[in-house]
Image: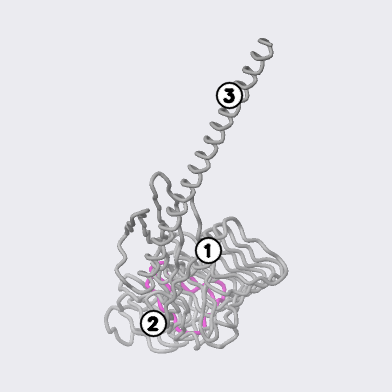
């Protein structure tokens, strides 16, 4: 009997011990769950305070209220610090860190000012060069007026069907007797070429002597400047960034606004419809019967592809506007490379406007260009440029410093960073 009693007591003690252990385990689980629930609550509070901070910053931005670089919001339950970074003149990055006790959440968003701006550009010549000047070789023809801030060299039977104005007393017009300027010319010095109109100069060995000298022509501003191109780059940011090359042949593609962080190759019968400004950080190739056009939504306005590397444009490819007579496609670079050809045109490539205010443009065997502005311009092998009078005053959508028709802040790349 005593043994049975002892066993019963032991069993009771074991059961009680198990129950006590279980109760401790359950208690620990309950405590853990409460802690997790509390932590989740704090995390949610941190998230919502961060989101509120971003919303507050966006509200200030949209309604043009004071928006410092840092904004703080504090409540009884949580707090946040909002940081605003200006990525470009039209893009801002807004980030917020929300805190609730020992919990935090990081949120960020980018905002882009998609102002419908129009920038009016005045173009009164077929060609305008910087101090690099102009070289016309092998019977090239420019139909339209020409301005240059450097020397103009005309070889063989090259001709300018229009007027030529060369700025600064240190520069001159020179070349071969067979080279012709059909209109008027003005330069400090004129050597050997034939001028059919009046010649305003200080010294001349050209086909006629100087008629007069009205004084030095001041440097003539280029029609498209690096500042303008920089503004165009800003407009491309609204569509986000594609990292890596864009390389397509055949088919039709709608592209823009977009930054392509790499090279862009449009080849072999591909057709690209530009729906917004494109900024290529690498090289640009349009070749082998490829076609690039502005979307019809541009109407009478113009648009651009800008690039940072080298543009190779050849083999009967083309780049034009929306189809409206006052709409033009601009291929442009603000790269500073005064001894480098950054736009190389060959083999019947046709385009509206080429611009490289700090570098050279070379055109060989092509007849479809309407306007070129660059630090230096070199035409070879019968290349022709025919100025289109519709270019004289064109409007660019999305330019900088123009007339703002409307302003909308677009939100993109919302994300939780941690």
> Which residue reaches farthest top?
2
- Residue 146: x and y in percent read 44, 80
Q: Residue tagged by mark 1?
A: 240
- Determine crowd level at label 3: few under 14, some 14-19, many 20+ residues with C-alpha closer than 10 A: few
Q: How many marks?
A: 3
Query: Sequence-wise, which precedes: disc 3 or disc 1?
Result: 3
Between the C-alphas of marks 3 and 2, the distance is 84 Å
Q: Position of residue 322 (x, y in %)?
A: 58, 82
Tell which circle, 3 or 2, labels the residue nearer the N-terminal end: 3
| Residue beneath the point at 45% across and 59% down | 339
Image vertical order of residue 325 relative to residue 48, above or below:
below
Q: Secondary structure at mark 3?
A: helix
* Front-most of residues 396 and 380: 396
Where on the picture, by quarter, is residue 265?
bottom right
- Report the front residue among 85 and 81: 81
Which range of residues does the magenta coloring cover? 129-156
Tell me, yes or no, whether the highlighted magenta stretch contains residue 237: no
């Amino acid at each position: 009997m005593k043994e049975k009693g002892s066993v019963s007591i032991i069993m009771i003690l074991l059961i009680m011990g198990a129950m006590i252990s279980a109760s401790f385990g359950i208690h620990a689980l309950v405590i853990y769950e409460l802690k997790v629930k509390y932590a989740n609550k704090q995390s949610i509070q941190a998230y919502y305070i961060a989101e509120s901070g971003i919303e507050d910053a966006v509200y200030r931005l949209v309604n043009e209220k004071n928006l410092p670089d840092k904004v703080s919001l504090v409540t009884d339950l949580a707090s946040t610090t909002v940081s605003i970074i200006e990525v470009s003149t039209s893009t801002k990055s807004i980030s917020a860190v929300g805190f609730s006790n020992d919990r935090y959440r990081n949120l960020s968003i980018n905002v882009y000012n998609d102002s419908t701006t129009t920038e009016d550009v005045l173009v009164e010549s077929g060609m305008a060069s910087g101090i690099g000047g102009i070289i016309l070789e092998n019977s090239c023809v420019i139909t339209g007026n020409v301005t240059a801030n450097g020397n103009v060299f005309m070889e063989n039977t090259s001709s300018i069907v229009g007027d030529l104005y060369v700025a600064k007393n240190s520069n001159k017009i020179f070349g071969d007797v067979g080279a012709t300027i059909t209109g008027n010319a003005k330069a400090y010095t004129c050597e050997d070429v034939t001028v059919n109109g009046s010649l305003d100069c200080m010294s001349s060995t050209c086909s006629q002597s100087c008629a007069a000298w009205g004084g030095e022509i001041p440097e003539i501003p280029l029609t498209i400047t690096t500042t303008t191109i920089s503004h165009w780059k800003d407009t491309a940011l609204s569509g986000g960034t594609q990292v890596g090359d864009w390389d397509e042949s055949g088919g039709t593609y709608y592209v823009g606004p977009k930054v392509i962080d790499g090279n862009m190759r449009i080849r072999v019968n591909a057709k690209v419809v530009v729906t917004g400004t494109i900024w290529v950080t690498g090289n640009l190739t349009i070749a082998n019967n490829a076609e690039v056009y502005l979307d019809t939504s541009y109407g009478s306005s113009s648009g651009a592809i800008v690039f940072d590397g080298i543009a190779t444009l050849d083999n009967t490819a083309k780049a034009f506007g929306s189809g409206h007579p006052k709409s033009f496609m601009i291929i442009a670079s603000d790269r500073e490379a005064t001894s480098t050809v950054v736009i190389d045109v060959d083999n019947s490539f046709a385009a509206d406007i080429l611009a490289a205010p700090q570098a050279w443009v070379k055109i060989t065997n092509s007849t479809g260009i309407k306007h070129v502005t660059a630090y230096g311009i070199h035409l070879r092998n019968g290349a022709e440029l025919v100025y289109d009078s519709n270019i004289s005053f064109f409007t660019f959508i999305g330019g900088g410093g123009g007339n703002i028709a409307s302003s909308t802040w677009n939100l993109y790349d919302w994300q939780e960073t941690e």
